[in-house]
Image: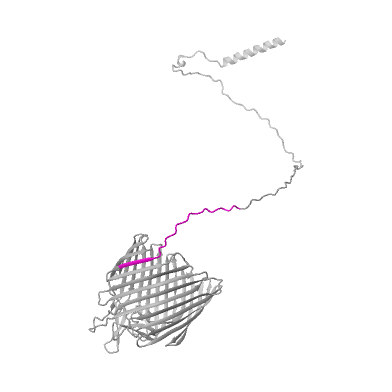
Amino acid sequence: MNTNTFKYTLFLSLFSLSVLTSAQDKKDQTSPAQQAPAGGTLIEEIEVVRPYKPVLADAVKIRRNPDMNRVAAFKPVLTYNIIDKKLDLNTNIKELQAQKMADEPAVVLVNNYAKVSAGNFNTALGEVYINTGRDEALQGGAFFKHLSQKGNLSMQQFSKQEFGLFGRSIADDYSLSGRLIYDRNATNFYGFDPASSIPADMSKQRFSTIGAEAEIANKYSESSLFNYSANINAYQFSNIDDARESSVLLRGSLNKAVKQSNIGVNASIDMTSTKDLAYKVGNNILRANPYIKLKASGFNLDLGVNIVQEFGTQSRLNIFPAVSAELPIIEGYATLFAGVNGDVLKTSLRELAFENPYLNKNIAIKNSLEKMNVYGGVKGNASAEFGYKIMAWYKTMEDLQLFVNSPVLINRFETIYDNGQSKILGLEGEINIKASEFLNMTAKAQLFDYTLATEQEAWFKPKLRLMSNARFQINRKVIIDAEVLIQEEIYGRVNGTAPGTFTSKSINGFIDLSAGAEYKVNEKFGVYIRANNLTGQSYQRFMYYPKLGMNVLGGINYAF
């Protein structure tokens, strides 16, 4: 039976295989169009009975849920072995080694300067400035200046020289400084009245001064018991004739900062002796100015008095207020300020000659008294490049000093004093502009109104003055500068028609414009040109003494 079963099973298998073979049979007979081409490309046609469809059988999942009722904790068995060894801690930060820089070459200092120039009116100008080296704690130097000119008028000549030595030493706690000077100013009395037939005396005039100054001051420190400074200034002045003046001025200050305040005192003694052919005057002044300065929330208040004792030929004691205050109204932009003070204004022959070199002999010496000076205004900065100040003041003066032409020698000047109380009302405005390195400019305007006790006019004192200067740095090599001075007409006193009488004479106002340019050839050499009084006006600062016309000069400068 097993043999028969095998036979039947084999027969069924062969039959099934034959049926499957006939279902997908290759056709042996092909048409001519389906024959292989000559190039050898095989073309074969396959008949697909049905597309293949893959089937993924179902996966058998095994579900194992955690037993939430099991609460036994796992406790691993730990063993410890203690090692008998010191633990080294290396927690220090390693110090970094700075990279050594190459030595920079020492900068060559250029702190010495010289220049020479020449121009029309026989102008000769020379200047030399010499300073010491790098040591900031010890500085010293010297300078020399020379200027000479000769105008078109007879005896219209000028010559001026200055020489000086200076030094400064800075220690840990204090500083010392000193200065020696010599100046010489020579001219002629070239003025004359064109309407007069009397020949003028055009003799020479010359002034010279030898002076010395020394100062010691401590460095400011809040821990210092006191802050102090002391100064001595002395000079000997003389003219070509017999006028002589010697002066010694001692000044000192002592102050102490206490929290937001500062308490101190300024004191000085000025001993001056002036003599000429007809007189000898002792003009000595002792001053003491105790004060206290208070500060709070930007508000500054200075309270003090100025005690002045005159002794010598004249003796009198005056006590003046010394009060000032500042209050910022717009922080950093506008500050109101006001004050009231007074002082004795010393009259010295040296200062008079500096202002007016055409003085007569035996000049009257008398101090003026500024009995009261009340002032107020506003100052501040509109930006980092623009600053301004506007102020007004009212002064009450006694014995106001004035210049007048001598009634005997009209090209000489005397000093007179407005006996009584003179009142001066003034207004002043000032601006400062600095737009980077290209432009640096300042301008100032002054208005004056005089009410005098005895004199008809404030002789040779202008009521309006405008001053301005500007500097333009075009580039590193070219610099241009300019100055202008504008002054309203002034009045001088001349002899009247009757003996012993006087009248006033007006002197025209003027505009004095000057400009210059400098070109730096290199770091050391430069050339420059300058023109003074470009309008060419022969204006007069004092009657019968016209200034030079347009003056052009040029030269070179050298830094070393």
In the rendered image, the vertical position of residue 241 relative to residue 514, given as above or below: below
Main SS category, magenta section: loop
Count the marks: how many? 0
In the rendered image, the vertical position of residue 366 relative to residue 99, given as above or below: below
In this rendering, does residue 140 appear at all?
yes
Residue 398: x, y in percent? 41, 85
Q: Indicate left or right for 185 with 74 as reference.
A: left
Taking the view exactly as shown, the residue that stands out farthest to the left is 197
Q: Please report the residue visible at 35 percent of the width from the left and 88 percent of the height from the top.
A: 278
- Of residues 218 and 9, the one nearer the viewer is 218
Q: Does the stretch in magenta take in 310?
A: no
In this rendering, does residue 369 appear at all?
no
Residue 146 in which image quadrant: bottom left
Please report the bounds of the magenta region as a residue range: 93-117
- Of residues 9 and 43, the one nearer the viewer is 43
Residue 487: x, y in percent? 33, 75
- Of residues 404 and 321, the one nearer the viewer is 404
